[in-house]
Structures are given as structure tokens and as C-alpha cells.
Image (tube, rainbow, N blue to C red):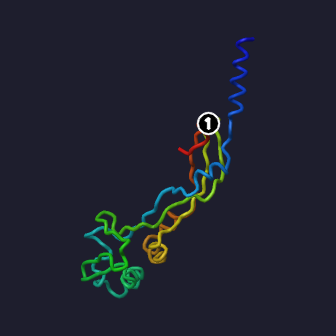
């Protein structure tokens, strides 16, 4: 009987301390959190740069790439001579990366809502979280042109789900 009493007390206290992670608690921890950033890029690195020698393109080639013309017309790129292009007066958000071409910050993914919670053990939980894309001002302003240069970006910025691991500590749940 003496051994049974401590065992019962342990079971009672463990049972009383068990808390399931709910959506409200998970949401409070995740409000305002970011889940990665997105870089946009276009062009090819020098010396084989699709914008190099823009003036050398025939009119028919220029018409096939209206985004190239728009980049110059909007001031995002400046081509001071027939062989060189660089970020123009409105292209301050562009960096000319020697490996990747022109690179810019497109935006970040932010918490939208908790979709589902799984709790495989009493002290761990996995929250499936919907995240939405929050575009940068630069990307918002030139979205049409930039998406034309990098069609994959529309898929890269689509809302999606992310798993967030939570662990139960003495003072409550915390994301890991």
C-alpha cells in the first residue's frame, strides 16, 4: 500500500499538468512571426548578360522582350552605352550580382493562421500554419515587369503551409 500511494500521486499530478496545445495559444506565439524571405532575380551574370548590348538588339527582338524595354523606360536599369547596363535611377533596390544577375528583395512570408494541430506526445505538438506573402514596396510597384522576367516568382510567393514544432515546458508551450 505504501508504494501505491506515491504512484497514484504521480499519476494525478501528471494528469493535472497535461495541457493540449490549442490554436489560440499557438496563434499568440506566432503573431507577427516571419517564415522566410523571397529574393527575386533576373538576367544572367556578365559577360553573357541578356541586357548587355540592349541597343544592339533588332527592333523585332526588342518587341519580343517588352520587359527589357520597360526596365529602361521606368528607370530601373540604365544602359549608358551599347555594351553595359546597370541599376538605373529607380533601381536602388537592385544589386548586380556577378553570379546570379540582378537581385532584389521581393518580400517575406508572415503568419496567417493555425490550420491544424497534431500532438504526437504529451510534451510535443506540431502546428500546421498557413503563411502569406507580404511583398516589398519595390516588388509591389514593379510586380508586372518583374513577374514577366521571372515567372517562377508567382509560384514562389504563393501562400503555403509550414509545420512549427512546439514543446511543453513547466511554464507552458513554446515554439522551437
* Residue drawn at (48%, 57%) of the image: 36
x, y percent for residue 98: 28, 65
Label 1: which secondary element: loop
* Residue drawn at (68%, 35%) of the image: 18
Residue that numbered label 1 is attached to: 123
Image-quadrant location for residue 97: bottom left
Q: Residue furthest bottom?
A: 59
Q: Nearer the viewer, residue 60 or 47?
A: 47
x, y percent for residue 148: 46, 75
User: Quadrant location of the N terminus?
Assistant: top right
Image-quadrant location for residue 42: bottom left
Height in image: 59 above or below 156? below
| Residue 139 located left or right of residue 75 | right
Q: Nearer the viewer, residue 125 or 6?
A: 6
x, y percent for residue 70: 40, 83
x, y percent for residue 77: 34, 79
* Residue drawn at (56%, 45%) of the image: 175
| Residue 143 located left or right of residue 1 | left
| Residue 155 located left or right of residue 66 | right
Q: Residue furthest top?
A: 1
| Residue 15 located left or right of residue 168 | right
Image-quadrant location for residue 111: bottom right
Amino acid at each position: 500500500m505504501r508504494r501505491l500511494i506515491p504512484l497514484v500521486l504521480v499519476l494525478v499530478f501528471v494528469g493535472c499538468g497535461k495541457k493540449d496545445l490549442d490554436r489560440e495559444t499557438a496563434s499568440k506565439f506566432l503573431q507577427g512571426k516571419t517564415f522566410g524571405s523571397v529574393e527575386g532575380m533576373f538576367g544572367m551574370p556578365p559577360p553573357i548578360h541578356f541586357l548587355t548590348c540592349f541597343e544592339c538588339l533588332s527592333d523585332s527582338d526588342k518587341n519580343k522582350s517588352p520587359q527589357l524595354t520597360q526596365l529602361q523606360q521606368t528607370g530601373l536599369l540604365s544602359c549608358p552605352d551599347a555594351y553595359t547596363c546597370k541599376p538605373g535611377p529607380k533601381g536602388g533596390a537592385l544589386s548586380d550580382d556577378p553570379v546570379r544577375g540582378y537581385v532584389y528583395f521581393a518580400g517575406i512570408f508572415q503568419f496567417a493562421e493555425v490550420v491544424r494541430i497534431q500532438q504526437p506526445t504529451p510534451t510535443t505538438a506540431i502546428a500546421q500554419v498557413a503563411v502569406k506573402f507580404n511583398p516589398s514596396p519595390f516588388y509591389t510597384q514593379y510586380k508586372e515587369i518583374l513577374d514577366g522576367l521571372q515567372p517562377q516568382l508567382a509560384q514562389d510567393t504563393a501562400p503555403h503551409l509550414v509545420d512549427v514544432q512546439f514543446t511543453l515546458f513547466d511554464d507552458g508551450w513554446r515554439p522551437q
